[in-house]
Image (tube, grey):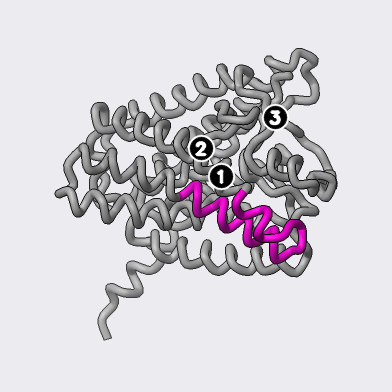
Amino acid sequence: MFIPIPAMHIPDGFLNVPVAVVGWALIVVVIGFALRQTRNQLGERQIPLMGILAAFIFAAQMINFPVAGGTSGHLIGGMLAAVLLGPWAAVLVMTSVVAVQALLFQDGGLLVLGFNIFNMGIVSVFVGYAAYDWIRKALNNTRTAQLVGAAVGAWLGVLAAAIAASLELAVSGTSPLEVVLPAMVGVHILIGIGEALITVAAVAFIQQTRPDLTGAAAAVEARGSTWIAVGLVLALVVVLVSPLANPNPDGLERVAEDHGFIEAAEDPPYEVIPDYQAPFIEDEALATIVAGVIGVVIVAAVGWGVSRLSGRSAAHDEPTSAQGP
């Protein structure tokens, strides 16, 4: 089978309705605050970066890598987005990715979408960035410090998201905390190592090719349009190798199978491109590639649109603040 398996995307049925509603309330508040925080951080040159980065993270999440015990994992990407854009813009990038995955690819439930965004796009981002920021400042913000901070931050971000998901499952009554927490932490300790290695490789590549993108996020000066095309091409290249993704269950799915709550998962209420398989193509590998290309284009557009929305809000605020009494 060529179908890539999602990592840490909670399906409907794993969380009860009251818990899921709390998740939606949390993300509405946090996303609203993120839009306000990024108003003065995103200029015309940063807006395309959000769209391209969202597309790349979407594509990279299609590539599952093997970990111990017949389990797979993949990049979450929150730490990478935070290094390049800062944590608040990273929240918007990850929200774009996770929302499109749920709405278009039935990757994660709709009712639990709030907590999927919260875990992968908020918890992983802020825990990871806090560690990254502390380490790079403690080590004088050298390139080595950035790489060490990115590695530690990426690993901690994955672990924090796994702990958050465990708490949500326990509060929902899906699995006792003393069962699900050690199981989730155990497998995501290993998945986090993969996240750290991929994040460090990406940051090191960017340090060599566009060192200005790893400086202060609010002062990024991304000149020219070549890097936009390169970023989009890289995302599409990743999609081309997505049929080679490891087919083993992801961390959450493995824990659900091993501890007897996998049957709680509910089927999605509709299907558009389920399991990253374009429904009009019979060949599984080609269907995965076509689905990935569609996803890259849509996620890039959504990421660009969200960043434009934030930038437009800033533009509307400026004249008011400039007016005298």
**Residue sitting at 31 percent across and 28 percent down?**
205
Q: Residues within 10 Å of mark 3 (few under 14, many from 20)?
A: many
Secondary structure type for disc 3: helix
Residue 77: give x, y in percent of width and height. 47, 41
Q: Which residue is mark 3?
A: 276
Q: Which residue is mark 1?
A: 186
Q: Amino acid at mark 3?
A: Tyr
Secondary structure type for disc 2: helix
Whether residue 268 sits left or right of residue 86 in the image: it is right
Q: Amino acid at mark 1?
A: Gly
Query: Circles 3 and 2: CB distance less than 8 Å?
Result: no
Report the Cα–Cα distance between label 1 and label 3.
28 Å
The first of marks 3 and 2 along the sequence is: 2
Magenta residues span 157-182
Query: Circles 2 and 1: CB distance less than 8 Å?
Result: yes
Q: Which residue is mark 2?
A: 190
| Of the pair 37 and 59, the residue shown nearer to us | 59
Q: Residues within 10 Å of mark 1 (few under 14, many from 20)?
A: some
Whether residue 205 sits left or right of residue 183 in the image: it is left
Q: Residues within 10 Å of mark 2 (few under 14, many from 20)?
A: many
